[in-house]
Amino acid sequence: MSQPRTLWEEGHEPGRQVVALGMALALTTVVVDLAVVGRVSSFFDLCFVALCVALALKVRPTDFFTVGVLPPLIMVAVFVLLGITRPGVIAHPSDGVVQAVISGLSRHSTALVVGYALCLACLAIRQRVAAAER
């Protein structure tokens, strides 16, 4: 009788699909946040941290590097899009794109650091579990 797979062994999605899923969910979170609050709030931060962990658990082991660099890229991409279209939701309305992105990153840096750290921790645990199985 074989043992059931653990949470750390379940990830099987290709890196490209995980990147697309991450961007889609991050942008969906921003849309919901803007519809409810009118700006990027702590709701985005909480969802971003959960998203980072979920992506680390979803990806297949051969694509760990892709997800290992993904959280900062997702946040920067989202804030660049917001800086181009609606800078007032992440910074002062009169700020330029670069200033809006920097302001957004600084205001949401805690979520970025926590999400990135948890993502890397999940990937490290998954790597150790996979190595122990071999």
Image (cartoon, grey):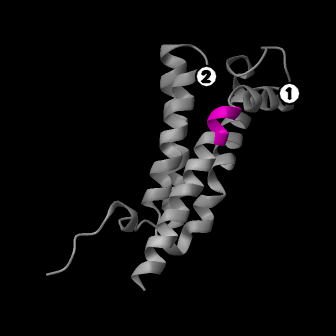
Decide if residue 30 is in sight here. Answer: no
The residue range painted magenta reads 109-113
- Image point 52% across, 53% down: which residue? 20
- Image point 84% across, 14% down: which residue? 94
In the rendered view, tell whether residue 39 sits above or below residue 54: above
- Image point 65% across, 39% down: which residue? 112
Badge 2: few (under 14), some or many (20 or more) residues near its Cα, within 10 Å?
Answer: many
* Direction bottom: furthest residue: 134
Query: Is residue 110 on the magenta stretch?
Result: yes
Assign a secondary structure to mark 2.
loop
- Image point 68% across, 47% down: which residue? 72
The front one of 52 and 75 is: 52
Task: Find the distance from the CA under tag 2 to the CA under tag 1.
Answer: 16 Å
- Residue matched to label 2: 40
Image quadrant holding the C terminus, namely bottom left
- Position of residue 98 in the picture relative to residue 3 (left or right): right
Query: Is residue 73 on the magenta stretch?
Result: no
- Residue matched to label 1: 99
> Horizontal and vertical percent for residue 124?
55, 64
Assign a secondary structure to mark 1.
helix
Question: Which numbered disc flags the more N-terminal residue, 2 or 1?
Answer: 2
Amino acid under disc 1: Gln
